[in-house]
Amino acid sequence: MNIKNQVSHLLVRWIRAVASGDVEQVVACYAPDALLLPTVSPRLRHNHAEIRDYFIHFLSKKPTGRIEEENIRIFGEIAVNSGLYTFLMMEDGQPKEVAARFTFVYRKTDGTWRIIAHHSSVVPA
């Protein structure tokens, strides 16, 4: 599998982890010193404990996501994947669709790719 396919698979793995509802599976996708700029929170998350705190709340909405577009660039041991995804989640007992832009930055350490920075924001109307 070439590097771009590996990086694409990392996003698929993250979306599946989110859909699983297992916060530890999601947190495992991130490096210990990762930075998360989440879609539905004004607070930046700087480490696993803070990232876990965000996803405990987010996963309670039962999100499922799909990738709309991704653009992968490789810079040695750093990879960037930016694009669009859409999440369907429950809000106040009703399904709600949220379209968002994303950028994931991955670093390969000891043969394993981990998210080191993740920014997601709602697509403007």
Image (cartoon, rainbow, N blue to C red):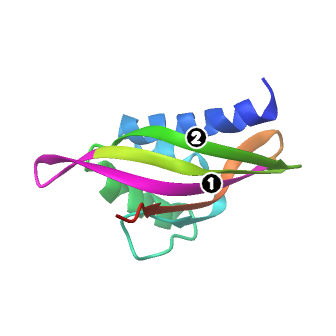
What segment carries the magenta color? 89-108
Question: Quick check: is 104 in the magenta stretch?
Answer: yes
**Mark 1 residue element:** strand
Residue beneath the point at 60% across and 43% down: 70
Please give left or right for residue 106 compared with residue 42 in the image: right
- Sequence-wise, the earlier of marks 1 and 2 is 2
Residue 92 in the figure: left or right of residue 112: left
Quarter holding residue 105: bottom right
Say which element carries label 2.
helix
Q: Residue at x 82, y 39 (%)?
A: 111
Q: Quadrant of residue 100?
A: bottom left
Label 1 neighbour load within 10 Å: few <14, some 14-19, many 20+: many
Location of the N terminus by quadrant is top right
Residue 104's disc is 1
> As shown in the figure, which amino acid type bears the numbered disc 2?
Leu
Q: Residue at x 65, y 36 (%)?
A: 8
Taking the spot 54% from the left edge, 34% from the top edge, the residue there is 12
Do residues under tags 1 and 2 come within 8 Å of each other at their CB atoms?
A: yes
* Side (left or right) of 40 relative to 81: left
Task: Give the residue type at disc 1.
Answer: Phe
Residue 81 tag number:
none
Residue 66 horizontal/vertical position (percent): 43, 37
Residue at which label 2 appears: 11
Whether 40 is drawn above or below 75: the answer is: below
